Amino acid sequence: MKLLVGVLFSFFLALPSAVARGGERGGTLSEYENDRSNVATTKARVLLEDEKSPNKIARARGYMTNSDLEKAVKDFGRRCSNISRIYSIGESVNGVPLWVIEISDKPGEEEGEPAFKYIGNVHGDEPVGRELLIRLANWICDNHLKDPLVRSIVENSHLHILPSINPDGFALQRRGNAKNIDLNRDFPDQFFPLNDDIHTRQPETAAVMKWLSEIRFTGSATLHGGALVANYPWDGTSDGRKHYYSCPDDDTFRFLASTYSQSHRNMSLSTEFPGGITNGAFWYPIYGAMQDWNYIHAGCFELTLEVSDDKWPMIDEIPTLWEHNKMSLLNLAASVLKTGVHGRIFASDSGTPLPGFITIKGINYTVNAGRAFGDYHRLLVPGERYEVMATMPGYKSKMTTISLGETAMTVDFILDPETTTKRYLWRTSGCNCGGSSSSSKFGFEMFWTLHFEVYVVIIILLFWFLIRRRLKSNLSNDKQHAARSSLLPA
C-alpha cells in the first residue's frame, strides 16, 4: 500500500508539460491500471475524445488517405518488384490492412543478414512518418544502383517499412486507434503488470507482436511528431518516478540515437535535449511502450524518433522534413551493418549452424543466433574492447576478446560438443531486467542431466538390487517353511 501511494505521489509530481511521443502523456499509474476496467475517462491508454477543429481538417488536406497510402504501397511493389515484396501483418480494428514494404536483393527469402524495420503513424494524429517512409522507399528504389550506402542496405540487409500502424486513428484524426486506445501504451510492460491480458490487446498491437515472433529484427525505429529528438530505453522506471533509467545497452542506444540525431539537419543542435537525444524515462516515464517491449522480448534495438516539432504540419512542409530526415533514416537503417560484431555459430563435429546465443561480458543481455544459418548480429559501440562469448547447450562455450573499430567486425564461432548431454529450456533474446511483472523474467534456464550410460548403470543396479532382495525373501520363506514342517507330528 505504501509503495502504491509513493508511486502515485511521484506521478503527480512528475506530470510533464511535454506533448510529444507524441502528444499529452496524461494519466497516473492507477488510472492506467483502471483502463483494464474500461474506465474511458483516463488519458493514458484510453484517450479523451478530441474535437475536429476546422483548422485541423484544413491541415489534413494534401496528406495521403488510407486508400492513397495502399495505392502508393502497391504501386511501389510493381515499380520496384526486383528489390521488394508487399505483405500485410494484419488488420486494424476497422479492417484496414497493415501493409509492409520489404526491401532487399532477395525479398521474402531467409538469409543470414540483419533485418531493420521502420514503423510510422503509431499515433493517428502524427502523420509525418507515413509520408516520410513512402518517400524513403521510393528514394531507395531510385538510387540503389548508384548510391553506395543504399546499395549496401539493399544487398546486405532486409529493410521492412510499415508506413502506418494506426490507419484508423489517422482517418479519425486522433491519437488513439478506432477504440481510442493509445497503441504506444498497449504493450506488455516490464515494471508493472499492464496489458498482459491478450483479450484486451488491440489488433494492431497483436499484429506487431506476431510480426516480431516471425522475423528476427536487429534494429528498429518508430516515427512520431511533436518534438525533435531521438528517444531510447528505458521508457519507464521501476519506481514510477521521472529520472534517467538506463537499460543494459545504454551506451549502444546512445550511439544509435546519436547516429540519427547527428545525421539530421538540426536535431543535434537542440537546446532542450543535449545532442538531440534523450532517455525516455528522463524525459517522462511511460508504460506499455513498444520500444521497451522490442528490446526485452524480441532482441530488437528500437528507438522512438520525434521527427517534427509540429505533430501535423501543413503538407507543403513535408519535402523539407524529408530532406532533414533522409540521411538520418538511411544511416540508422545501415547501422545494423556498419557497427557491432556479426557472425555465425557452427558445430565442430558436423559443421551445421547452431542456434546458440551471444553474450558480452559486463552487459546483461542475450542475443540469439538464427536457427537456419546460426547467424547473430550484436550491435555495440565502436572503439571499445569486448569479451564476446558464444554458447549453445550441449556444446562447450567459447569466448574471444575483440577490439571493435569504426566498422563492423565478423567473428565466427566453432563449438565443440560436450561429453555430457545438456537439456535446456529456450528463451528468446533479452535481458533479466528485474521488473516486477512475471513477463519481465527473461534469459534462459538450463538444467543438467546425467549421461545416457549413467542411466543404464543405475537401471542395472536397481534391477540387481530388486532381484537380490527377491532371492533373499524366497530363501527366508523356504527356511521358515522347513522349520514349521519339522515341528509337525509324524
Image (spheres, rainbow, N blue to C red):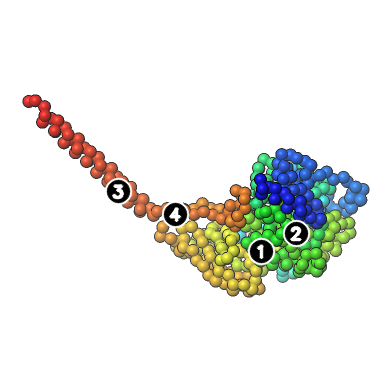
Residue 392 screen position, x and y as percent:
50, 59
- Compare residues 380 and 155 and report the one nearer the observer: 380
Determine crowd level at label 3: few under 14, some 14-19, many 20+ residues with C-alpha closer than 10 A: few
Determine crowd level at label 4: few under 14, some 14-19, many 20+ residues with C-alpha closer than 10 A: few
Residue 26 screen position, x and y as percent:
78, 49
Q: Nearer the viewer, mark 1 or mark 4?
A: 1
Type of amino acid under label 3 = Leu
Who's the residue at 87% across and 57% down the image? Answer: 313
Q: Nearer the viewer, mark 2 or mark 1?
A: 2
Precedes in sequence: disc 2 or disc 4: 2
Residues under numbered marks 1 and 4 in contact, where contact means CB atoms less than 8 Å apart: no
Q: Nearer the viewer, mark 3 or mark 2?
A: 2
The residue carrying mark 4 is: 448
Q: Quadrant of residue 324?
A: bottom right
Element under label 4? strand
Who's the residue at 35% across and 53% down the image? Answer: 454
- Seen as rendered, the residue at the extreme top is 489
Is residue 159 visible in the rendered image? The answer is no
Q: Nearer the viewer, mark 2 or mark 4?
A: 2
Who's the residue at 10% across and 31% down the image? Answer: 486
Element under label 2? helix
Q: Nearer the viewer, mark 1 or mark 3?
A: 1
| Left-right relation of 345 to 326 | left
The residue carrying mark 1 is: 250
Q: Gap between marks 1 and 4, in whole Å? A: 33 Å
The residue carrying mark 2 is: 283
The residue carrying mark 3 is: 461
Type of amino acid under label 1 = Asp
Who's the residue at 66% across and 45% down the image? Answer: 1
Q: Gap between marks 3 and 4, in whole Å? A: 22 Å
